[in-house]
């Protein structure tokens, strides 16, 4: 690991003042430290933000929204009674990711900034436009079975690996940030960027901006009765998604009055599919409708390599997530959170 400077500022203002283009923020460190060990990331300065005050709370605001501090860890958030009751698919997505030990360390802010699992990004000896702009993309001609089928470009075919971010996209979350120019809010739909011709710019954060919190609007709680996150992965425990879906329905009088659907692990950002949501709205929940919605969700998908199979797989995941959501949210998170296997009736989760 390359030598670097390390500081622990006491205030948000001190942290932002210390930032330089060669610096990296450190929260739980579950992603950053891994990448520093391999040499994929080599910051000159690591700014530890874990001593900053006010970033570790979960609170309900007067307008009914839920504000989650950037330093809340994944385990605490997943088991928070308010999150379980109001936003169950957020809890299900969190509990489907990583291991219990990692969830105890990983933070909300770090999860939003999680880097791609593309092997060529993680290998400092490989050409990767995302890690080293202008160097090329070895993934184009390499092992690309599990890379993007939506929103990719000739410069980059990497995917976003986060489970947590998929339901956040479906529920219209908002990200609160602070930087040298002050505080601002970013709609979650605009937070992650598609690669285009500048894949090195992965988010809407400006230089020196720090994530303070995440906010879920009060309206998102209206989906609590019919909301599921479904994740397909190579093995049941501790694996990143091959394809995932967050599906949420409001069902009134036997018809879907409002729908939300977002897909994961298919693009460089969580993929909200408003066309599918519009198709679902106003209709009775039934298998044929869910298949048509999934077809609409993947209508623009194209292989970026030897991964055409992933399009049909994602279509099936979306269909099943909608079917599970229509059946109702379990009273408790299933024993295998977000898995298509095992008991879905809501036994206590293994953690």
Image (tube, rainbow, N blue to C red):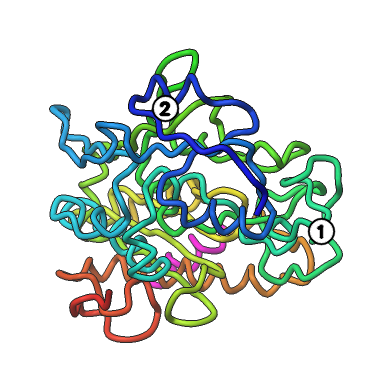
Q: Which mark is residue 177?
A: 2
| 321 versus 125 height, above or below | below
- On the image, numbered disc 1 is attached to which residue? 125
Residue 27: image x %, image y %?
Answer: 41, 45
Locate residue 251 relative to residue 11 in the image: left or right. Answer: left
The residue under the point 36% across, 32% down is: 212
**Per the image, is 180 magenta?**
no
Residue in the foreground of this view, choosing between 30 and 161: 30
In the rendered view, tell whether residue 52 sits above or below residue 80.
above
Dot 1 or dot 2, earlier in sequence? 1
| Residue 329 relative to residue 40: left or right | left
Residue at 32% across / 37% down in the picture? 51
Classify residue 310 as left or right of residue 329: right
- Mark 1: secondary structure: loop
Q: Nearer the viewer, residue 72 or 310?
A: 72
Graded by Cα atoms within 10 Å as few (under 14), some (14 to 19) or many (20 or more), the crowding at tag 2 reads some
Magenta region, residue range: 287-297
Tell me the chief SS of the magenta region.
helix
- Mark 1 is surrounded, within 10 Å at the Cα level, by few (under 14), some (14 to 19) or many (20 or more) other residues, namely few
């Amino acid at each position: 690991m390359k030598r670097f400077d390390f500081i622990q500022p006491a205030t948000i203002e001190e942290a932002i003042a210390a930032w330089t283009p060669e610096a990296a923020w450190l929260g739980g460190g579950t992603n950053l430290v891994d990448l520093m060990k391999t040499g994929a990331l080599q910051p000159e300065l690591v700014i530890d933000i874990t001593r900053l005050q006010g970033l570790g709370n979960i609170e309900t605001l007067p307008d009914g929204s839920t504000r989650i501090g950037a330093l809340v860890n994944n385990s605490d958030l997943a088991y928070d009674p308010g999150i379980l009751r109001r936003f169950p698919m957020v809890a299900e997505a969190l509990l489907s990711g990583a291991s219990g030990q990692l969830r105890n360390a990983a933070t909300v802010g770090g999860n939003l900034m999680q880097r791609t699992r593309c092997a060529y990004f993680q290998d400092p000896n490989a050409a990767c436009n995302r890690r080293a702009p202008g160097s090329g993309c070895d993934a184009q001609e390499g092992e690309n079975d599990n890379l993007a089928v939506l929103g990719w470009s000739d410069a980059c075919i990497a995917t976003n690996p986060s489970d947590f971010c998929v339901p956040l996209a479906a529920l219209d979350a908002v990200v609160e940030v602070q930087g040298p120019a002050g505080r601002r809010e970013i709609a979650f739909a605009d937070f992650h960027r598609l690669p285009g011709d500048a894949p090195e710019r992965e988010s809407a954060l400006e230089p020196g901006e720090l994530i303070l919190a995440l906010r879920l609007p009060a309206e998102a709680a209206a989906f609590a009765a019919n909301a599921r996150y479904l994740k397909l992965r190579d093995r049941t425990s501790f694996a990143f998604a091959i394809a995932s879906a967050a599906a949420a329905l409001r069902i009134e009088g036997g018809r879907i009055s409002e729908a939300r659907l977002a897909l994961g692990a298919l693009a460089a950002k969580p993929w909200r599919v408003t066309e599918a949501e519009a198709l679902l709205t106003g209709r009775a929940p039934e298998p044929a409708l869910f298949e048509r919605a999934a077809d609409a969700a993947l209508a623009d998908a194209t292989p970026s390599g030897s991964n055409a199979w992933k399009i049909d797989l994602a279509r099936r995941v979306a269909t099943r997530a909608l079917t599970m959501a229509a059946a109702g949210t379990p009273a408790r998170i299933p024993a295998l959170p977000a898995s298509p296997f095992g008991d879905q009736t809501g036994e206590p989760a293994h953690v």
